[in-house]
Image (cartoon, rainbow, N blue to C red):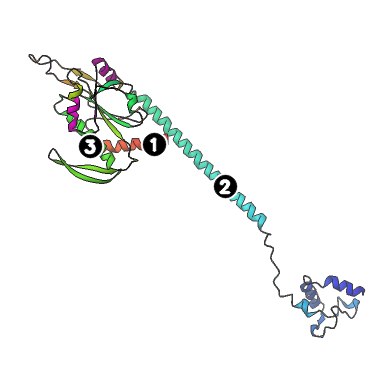
Amino acid sequence: NEYKSYLSDMIRPSCIRHILTRCSRSHVTMRSRHVTSPHHVTSPHHVRSSVQLYVPLRFLSQLDRPQPKNKFRMLPLLGATSLLVGAIGLAVFSFTEDKKKYMLEQKKARAVSSKGKALLGGPFNLINTEGETVTDKDFLGQWILIYFGFTFCPDICPEELEKIGDMIKIVELHYSVKAELVERDGRLIVEPTDIDPSCPKIQPIFISVDPKRDTPDLIKQYLKDFHPRFIGLTGSKEQVKAATRSYRVYFSESPALPGTDNQDYMVDHSIVTYLVDPNGEFSQHFGQKISAEEAAEKIQQKIREFEEINGN
């Protein structure tokens, strides 16, 4: 009974392979086909030398069964790996966001610096072609192109006003779904149609530097030959001077021809178009020599920079 209890503890399914290995090394003879009892050993002193060991077949049949794997053994490792990958991803994301914020702050700083050097733009208080008072605050929220000139200008002003209209059309073509050819003054012009709503509105403004002759009605008739959105502004001599000082515009009235009641004269003035952003701040200026295509490209660049800085 003592040895049966011993072998009962030793010979379990999990220990069979180990015991058989030791038995093979000690020349143990196994005869499972003559099993008469679950456990039988001839002599307890012969376990390590020559033992006749009887093992039930039901134990031997379990040797080839695959041992069940512990499905939860890898959970700690997987958890640690997941935490490590998550930490790395969070660090990369934080670094990228910090870099974006840094670049944005640098761009804002450059924009403020460049605007501080320009010293152009500012408030104005004028009268439109309907006789209504208009200020710079009325144009906040939209891009504007301002040109200073006069209706009696023989050639330069009409050319610049025509070019301003072409700038706007070129910008709008990038946002339009369709376009059509329109004949105007003996030439074909591409007119954008079905413009995407995301297209920023650009408002052209004509400010007269000849308030003595340029009445609101005269300016209204004059601008009909140019872009349909053109707004004409004039005012008293003091109001016009205040607006020209804000944009550093030079103008000078030449002496009138004799016998014309001081009405036949020319006005010498700066030939510059000013781009103002939706915040009412000066953004870019265009001289007489720049083409409409080049100016339109710079306008689009300024619009992109403004939207990046202001998050639009």
Instruction: Give the CA separation, mark 2 to mark 3.
Output: 52 Å
Q: Is residue 281 above or below residue 188?
A: above
Q: Which mark is residue 88?
A: 2
Query: Can I make out residue 150 in this image?
Result: no
Q: Where residue 289 sits in the image (x, y, percent)?
A: 22, 32
The residue beneath circle 1 is: 307
Q: Is residue 94 above or below residue 157?
A: below
Nearer-N-terminus badge (2/3): 2
Mark 3 burial class by Cα count in 10 Å: few <14, some 14-19, many 20+? many
Instruction: Give the CA separation, mark 2 to mark 1.
Output: 32 Å
SS at circle 3: helix
Q: Residue furthest left?
A: 259
Q: What residue appears at the point 70 percent right and 67 percent down from the top-left corner? A: 68
Q: Which mark is residue 166?
A: 3
Question: What is the three-letter code of the residue carrying label 3?
Answer: Asp
On the image, which quarter does residue 227 sit in?
Answer: top left
Q: Which mark is residue 283?
A: none
Q: Where residue 301 sits in the image (x, y, percent)?
A: 33, 37
Q: Is residue 196 above or below residue 214?
A: below
Instruction: Give the CA separation, mark 1 to mark 3.
Output: 23 Å
Query: Can I make out residue 169 in this image?
Result: yes
Q: Is residue 110 above or below residue 15?
A: above
Q: Nearer the viewer, mark 2 or mark 3?
A: 3
Q: Which residues are magenta?
A: 219-245
Question: What is the three-letter code of the residue carrying label 2?
Answer: Ile
